[in-house]
């Protein structure tokens, strides 16, 4: 055995013997001397041990309190985070309920499931399919306007493309009905990729920034009057007989947690008056001017459009309009696939 180990063992043994001797001495003391002797020992020999015990107890209590405080803080942070998410989800659901009350019939609501793989930024899977009346080319709409169209429909689900898909096309017109053209995804780079392009406008027709673009109803795919977006600026092209414009979409892909799918009877009947409210021309013009200036500078700081996987909120970067009170709208009928009074 090493010498250091033997010396430590001897020291421990000596301390143990000394403690036994002190204990025996305390036991045999007369009661009159026992309490004064114990008090003297607490003030002298045992005082460091008592202080050490007090410090250890305070440390243990501090650790217990620290763990409790950390758990409470984490719980509050989680509740606050979930509260903001739930509030945003409730606001979105109120807007969808308002749209359902305006449509009244001829639609089905669906959850939009976005993929994360390459090339899935422009497509969504819908939680409804042919068994609910969904057919290919059924329009997808949101409270802000046009979302896209159904590509294929299975019995229980369907696949849809968004307005940002390269194959998306929609017959469009200006809000005053003076100009007609075709809207498609803008083949730009960076943030400008998430803009739309209005083409085929006759050269004699000139649109100003802030002009609202709606579906024209031509072709029978989309009902007339669904908002598509607002004009940002004219795009210079080599065509001498037609004008092209960059359009800020009305719907942001980041908002697509739930959509409405218009069924064929509703498409044929039209959607007049459903999206009749228009934003103030001054605010639309200011928003378009900011994006136009950013594009001219070649930067992206002023472009508020985001990718579908972004955390930005609001339609195309802007906060959603305050929803109307649910009590102020008529409740939609239970059967939303038929017109009121239809059989």
Image (tube, helix red, strand yellow):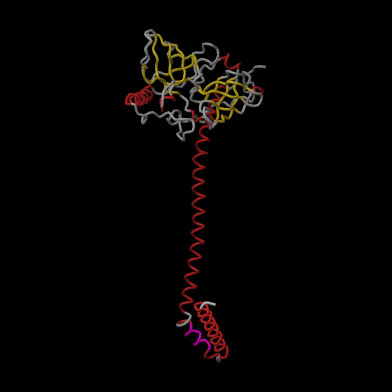
Residue 294 is left or right of residue 76, and the answer is left
Indicate the position of residue 178 as horizontal and vertical percent values. Answer: 42, 10
Identity of the residue drawn at 65% across and 22% down: 130
Indicate the position of residue 201 as horizontal and vertical percent values. Answer: 41, 11
Front in this rendered view, residue 231 or 161: 161
The magenta span reads: 34-41
Indicate the position of residue 146 as horizontal and vertical percent values. Answer: 50, 22
Residue 132 is left or right of residue 288, and the answer is right
Identity of the residue drawn at 50% across and 49% down: 76
Placement of 205 over or under 149, stated as above or below: above
Query: What type of secondary structure mainly makes up the magenta span?
Result: helix
Q: Quadrant of residue 157?
A: top right
Residue 216 is left or right of residue 209, and the answer is right
Identity of the residue drawn at 51% across and 32% down: 92
Q: How many numbered marks have been drawn onto this rendered protein structure?
A: 0
Front in this rendered view, residue 173 or 168: 168
Placement of 41 over or under 169, stated as above or below: below
């Amino acid at each position: 055995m090493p010498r250091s180990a033997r010396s430590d063992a001897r020291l421990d043994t000596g301390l143990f013997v000394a403690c036994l001797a002190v204990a025996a001495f305390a036991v045999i003391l007369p009661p009159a001397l026992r309490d004064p002797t114990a008090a003297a020992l607490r003030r002298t020999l045992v005082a460091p041990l008592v202080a050490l015990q007090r410090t250890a107890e305070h440390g243990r209590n501090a650790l217990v309190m620290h763990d409790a405080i950390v758990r409470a803080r984490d719980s509050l942070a989680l509740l606050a985070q979930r509260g903001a998410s739930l509030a945003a989800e409730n606001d979105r659901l109120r807007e969808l309920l308002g749209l359902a009350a305006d449509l009244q019939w001829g639609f089905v609501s669906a959850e939009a499931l976005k993929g994360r793989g390459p090339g899935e930024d422009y497509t969504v899977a819908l939680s409804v399919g042919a068994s609910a009346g969904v057919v290919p080319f059924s329009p997808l709409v949101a409270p802000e306007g046009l979302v896209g169209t159904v590509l294929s429909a299975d019995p229980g689900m369907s696949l849809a493309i968004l307005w940002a898909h390269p194959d998306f096309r929609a017959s469009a017109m200006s809000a005053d009905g003076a100009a007609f053209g075709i809207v498609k995804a803008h083949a730009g780079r960076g943030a400008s990729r998430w803009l739309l392009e209005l083409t085929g406008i006759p050269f004699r027709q000139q649109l100003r920034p802030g002009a609202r673009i709606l579906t024209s109803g031509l072709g029978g795919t989309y009902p007339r009057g669904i908002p598509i977006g607002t004009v940002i600026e004219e795009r210079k092209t080599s065509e001498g007989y037609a004008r092209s414009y960059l359009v800020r979409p009305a719907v942001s892909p980041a908002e697509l947690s739930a959509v409405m799918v218009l069924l064929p009877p509703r498409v044929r009947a039209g959607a007049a008056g459903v999206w009749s409210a228009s934003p103030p021309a001054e605010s639309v013009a200011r928003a378009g001017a900011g994006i136009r200036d950013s594009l001219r500078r070649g930067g992206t700081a002023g472009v508020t459009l985001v990718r579908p996987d972004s955390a930005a909120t609001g339609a195309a970067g802007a906060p959603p309009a305050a929803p109307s009170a649910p009590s102020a709208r008529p409740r939609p009928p239970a059967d939303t696939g038929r017109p009121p009074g239809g059989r």
